[in-house]
Amino acid sequence: KQEVTQIPAALSVPEGENLVLNCSFTDSAIYNLQWFRQDPGKGLTSLLLIQSSQREQTSGRLNASLDKSSGRSTLYIAASQPGDSATYLCAVMDSSYKLIFGSGTRLLVRP
Amino acid sequence: EPEVTQTPSHQVTQMGQEVILRCVPISNHLYFYWYRQILGQKVEFLVSFYNNEISEKSEIFDDQFSVERPDGSNFTLKIRSTKLEDSAMYFCASKKEATNEKLFFGSGTQLSVL
């Protein structure tokens, strides 16, 4: 059974710092991996999608990498801003095309 | 970008009552999903639906839950007799094909069972 783990559970950084969020999964038979942002009490905003054949994807200050064989992904946020404060969720698409989510990393960027 | 629409955004109900959560998937999508997120917990898969049939369901999706596509546009999740532990945010999602493309999520319905 696929398990997705995210480390750390919470992170507090000063504004301007570069940071890395980690995601690991137990079964490497995935179709893709998505990173989402969730603000408190709100829905899921898709940030980046990496297909299983890809190594990384970039969007603005965000860069996500995928190492499928080792079951790991990282989300790199450059020059963090207070507006980046949110929970970041990692999810993998399994062999039946459903997403399995991690518990998330709660990020606080202090002004 | 096209959107998945969910209504209502908030629903309050009494324990034991039936609730129907509504979703309008993106118009040319064929695969539909419900997920839920209990406060402070992971987003969990409930059910997937294609061609008017359930494709897969989790152990959470017991006989109290049902899904339906009553017409060409709506996709509903019914909870027959709500329990306190059904209180959660419920997300609908859809995608076009049975491939590795992205799932599009709605903004969720916050269900509170009193």
Image (tube, coloured by chain):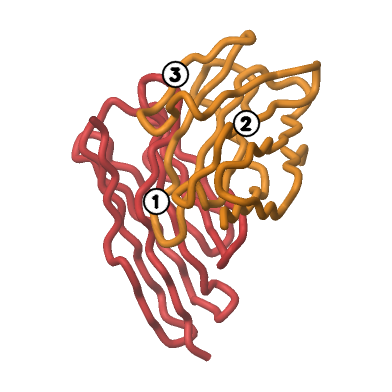
Chain colours: A red, B orange
The x, y position of residue A106, in whole percent, is 41, 69
Q: Quadrant of the N terminus of chain B?
A: top right
Query: How far apart in space, not on screen, are marks 2 and 3 (Cα)?
Result: 14 Å
A15 over B4 or under it: above or below? below
Mark 1 lies on a secondary structure that is loop
Q: Which mark is residue B65?
A: none
* Amino acid type at image mark 2: Leu
Give me the chain letter of mark 2.
Answer: B
Q: Tag 1, which chain?
A: B
The numbered dot on residue B77 is 2
Q: Which mark is residue B42?
A: 1
Give the alpha-carbon distance from disc 2 to disc 1, as whole Å: 19 Å
Task: Say what amino acid the circle numbered 3 marks.
Answer: Glu
Residues at marks 2 and 1, common chain?
yes
Q: Label 1 near label 2: C-beta < 8 Å?
A: no
Return the chain for callout 3: B
Same-chain check, marks 1 and 3: yes
x, y percent for residue B64:
50, 29
State the separation of the CA atoms marked 1 and 3: 19 Å
Residue that label 3 marks: B56
